[in-house]
Structure formats: structure tokens, C-alpha cells
Amino acid sequence: MFISTRCRNNGFTLKNFVWAKSSIFRSVSNQSVKTKAAKKPDGIFSYAPINNKSYIKIRGPDTVKFLNGLITSKLLPTFIKKNLTTIENSENQPETDKNKATPNVPVPEFDARLGNWGLYNEIGIQGSYISRFGLYSAFLNGKGKLITDTIVYPTPVSLSEGTPNYPEYLLELHENVVDKILHVLQSHKLASKIKFEKIDHLSLKNWNVEVQFPNLPEDIENPWFDNLLDPMALAKTSEDASNFAANVLQSLFKSDPRILGVYVERRTELISRHNSTFPQSFRLVTSQQVEDPSKLFNFDVFEFPFQVKRMDPAEIRQRRFQNGLVDSTQDYKPETLLPLELNFDFLPNTISTNKGCYVGQELTARTYATGILRKRLVPVKLENHSHLDTDPEKKYPEFHLDSTIEKDFAHPDSAPNPFANKTSALSKRKQRPAGSLIANEGQYGVALLRIEHFSVAFSSDEPVEFSITTTKGENVKIIPQIPLWFDNWQQNNALRK
């Protein structure tokens, strides 16, 4: 993996990175060979095709500024305040445990109209950085509702074959929402110097790839952080970002020219940071000639054997739901949810809180500032999921808390009213849903759960029951799982009080 030298003054420096065979992985492999106790292979390469993606290619001198006004991520190091008279640099990101000992180094000023800079990322371990890997973001409507999430890929991945004269990106979308986003782009284009076009879905392929080392000791940090995730967040210039991307492509994927875009999954960092065996996921956009992405992977860089597994896309979707994540309008209906309800504020560089105006910014910024949010997306397990109504045109199925618990929970401190009609009061409480099931794949799904029920769902010593009653009168039990961001949410909630 990447071997790095940490400087006391400047933290990591990209110039010192060399891709080499990791002594950590080598020692694990040797130990497993000696003891013969490991039942799992030292390396697992899993992949699955994703067949419902389409792409919009967008390029031109005004591309960065244009996209910055449409998506929720911040693509420029400066922003314009509401009074439109000052421009302020936003490099004063709050410190995290990972960057307390490292300086916050700003990205130098750059002209986004000239050259292919890659993607500006607002928050990294030393402040903002430049990357040539994909960025997870979102398009909102004027009311702040999510039209779709998207991955923005700088293309080409590296600039080893020359620097284009202007920025160029691929927008990854579910095939059922591409025409809508084309309409959004066209309606906002005005005099912007950009060109965009829909790419024939048969000309590109999309792959979900996971690389896992299941035999690593539990007491070490996941090696992907020191070897990929942290270094990729250090590039301050387009040249550094391009060199790093070229190094990764050469080392992991043999610099195969059929790879047109790479997304490095960072949404699950809260899990993988404390789990050494958690797999690192990638999204690869390739030409149509690729039939098996394992043929692109450079297994020779590791000193131990790999098992290669082709996974079903449904299994990938289940894993995504287990982590409480959605992926495109396959998992939700456009313009029905708020981005903060989907926890986009806990995903790295997905929503900027200070970049200024963009479509849907007003409600999003107000919700973030006030902290007033009624529901959030959580992973759930379902029992009797086969009984669910499957009509996609219907609203999200609502589920309810057990009536006895809900009665006690709704007014825990209020005295009983001797004149109240208890039967009608209980009936009214039953009608108020505790949440809605957004999507599921078999027994795993994601649901919007009202925040007022978090305490009984995640902190109660006794299990509580939520259920959906189908049109046929059958009950589907909903079991909320603790989301990966729950501890951070509790800390933020405590600070607001």
C-alpha cells in the first residue's frame, strides 16, 4: 500500500508516497499460513455490475461555477455573501480528532475557468483539498426537496496525457431521472459557457467494487486510511491531485485506459475508521468493453492470494441499506425528501453550509442552522417483508409504534384527564405514524423515523415494536438499527441544548 512519511510541520506530503507491498498485510498473510487457523482468504475482491445508471457529460469554462450553483457541495474555495459585496475565503473548518495536530492549509487561489482542476473538496484532514476522484452530491428543487443524489466524476481521472483547456465532468444519475436533470441544466444555463449532453447508456458500464482484508487484527486501524483515504485528502493543487490519482490507478488498476471515472467511498468512514476488516468500496465507470473488473485489478501489489467474488446487485443494495445509505432514485421518489432527512449533513463534502446561494439552499441552510428536523433516515430490518405492498406508485408505507408504548411515550409527564374519551384518544395516537419505510431489498431497508422515537428505538433496554399494516391486514415488523452517525448526532444535539 502507500508508504508515507509524516512531517512534523506539514503533516503528510504527497511527494513521499510510494506504492509498495504493505508489511502489515504481509505479516498477516505469513501468520495465517503458519497457523493455518484462518478460514477466510487474506484478500477478497468483490464486484457487481450496476445496470441502471446513465450519465450527463458537462464541460466548458463556466462548468465549475455553473455546477456550484446547482448542487449541494461546494466546488469553489470562495463564496459570495448575501449582500453581494464581499468574497470570503472559508478555510476555517472546525477541527476533528484526526486533524487537531495538523495545520489547516488552504487550497491556493485558482481560476476555475482555465484547465481541468478536478474537484474542490471543502473539508479534509488539513482543510480543503483537490481530488480527481468522484464526489457524492445532490440536486435540490426550489423548495429544498431532493430531486436526486449524484456522483460527479472529473474526467479523465488523471491528466497524464495532457491538460484539457477547461473543466470536464460526468454526472452519474439513475436512468429514470436523467431527462429531468437535463431540463434543470437547460433552464439554468442562460449565458453560461458550458456544453452538456446525455451519454448513450450502452457506451459506459458501472461497477461496484469492494476490497477487503478479513484477517487483519482487530486492534489496528483500517489500513485504507493511511494508505488511501487520508492521503487523497491532502492534495492542494491540480498537479498533486492528478499525480496521486495516476499513482492509485497504476498501483490498483494497472492504469487501464478503459477506466473513465473512479469514486472512492467515504460515506462509511465512521464505520471503517474503527473496523480494520471493513471493506473499502469503489465505484468504477468503464467503457463497454469491460466484462469483469477483477481483470483490471492489480493483485500483484499484494503478497497474498485473493478470492474473487461476483455479487448480485441486490446484495450490494442490501449492504447499502444496512449502512443507512441510499443511491439514486432507485431508492426513493424524487422531490419527496429533504437532504438532511437523509443525513447528508453527516456525509463528507456532500452539503456545504457556507458556500452561499444554490437551488434549494434557503430551506436547507435554515434547517441546518435551527436544528429543527422531525425525521431522519435509519437502517431497519423487516420481518415478514414478503407481505409488503409492492405498488411503486403508492406513498411510502407508514409504520406505527406499539399502541401501549406510544400512549405512554406521547405524554409521559401529563396527568390523566378524567373527562377525556380514552378510546378516541388512543385511536388518534394510533393514526400518527412513527415513520415511513422508504425502500427495502428483502429483509433490509431504510426508513424515516421520527426523532422523538429515537430514545425508545435505540436506547431502550426493552425491545419496542414498530409495524406496517398492509392492505390485506397483515403486519410487517420494523426493527430500527442504530445508524452509523448516531453518536455524532447525540453530541450535536447536546451542544444545541
Image (tube, rainbow, N blue to C red):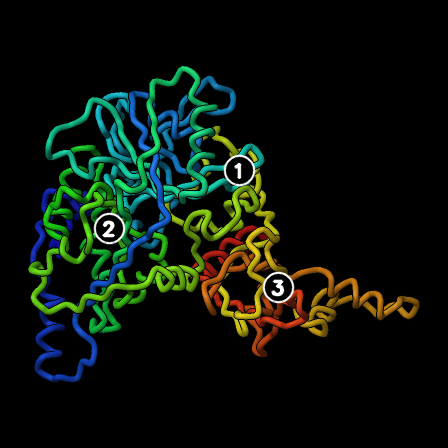
What's the mark number on residue 150? Answer: none
- Mark 2–mark 3 Cα distance, whole angstroms, equals 36 Å
Image quarter where the N terminus lies is bottom left
What's the mark number on residue 453? Answer: 3
Residue nearer the viewer, 349 or 246: 246
Along the polypeptide, which appears first: circle 2 or circle 1?
Answer: 2
Please name the amino acid that badge 1 sits on. Answer: Ala
Choose top left, top right, bottom left or bottom right for residue 26.
Answer: bottom left
Q: Count residues near mark 2 (Cα–Cα under 10 Å), then give few for <14, some for 14-19, many for 20+.
A: some
Asked if residue 223 can be seen in this view, the reply is yes
Residue at position x 48%, y 51% in the image:
343
Residue at position x 19%, y 47% in the image:
11
- Look at the numbered discs 2 and 3 and tell me whether their residues touch, using CB distance below 8 Å: no
SS for callout 1:
helix
Q: Count residues near mark 1 (Cα–Cα under 10 Å), then give few for <14, some for 14-19, many for 20+.
A: some
309 in relation to 489, above or below: below
Describe residue 129's horizontal placement relative to residue 473 as left or right.
left
Tell me where residue 200 appears, x and y as whole percent.
Answer: 31, 37
Along the polypeptide, which appears first: circle 3 or circle 1?
Answer: 1
- Mark 2–mark 1 Cα distance, whole angstroms, equals 28 Å
- Look at the numbered discs 2 and 1 and tell me whether their residues touch, using CB distance below 8 Å: no
What's the mark number on residue 365? Answer: 1
Tell me where residue 272 appears, x and y as whole percent.
Answer: 31, 62
454 in relation to 69, above or below: below
Q: Count residues near mark 3 (Cα–Cα under 10 Å), then give few for <14, some for 14-19, many for 20+.
A: some
Residue nearer the viewer, 386 or 228: 386
Residue at position x 41%, y 51% in the image:
327
In this view, which residue lies farthest toward the front? 202
Residue at position x 20%, y 67% in the image:
44
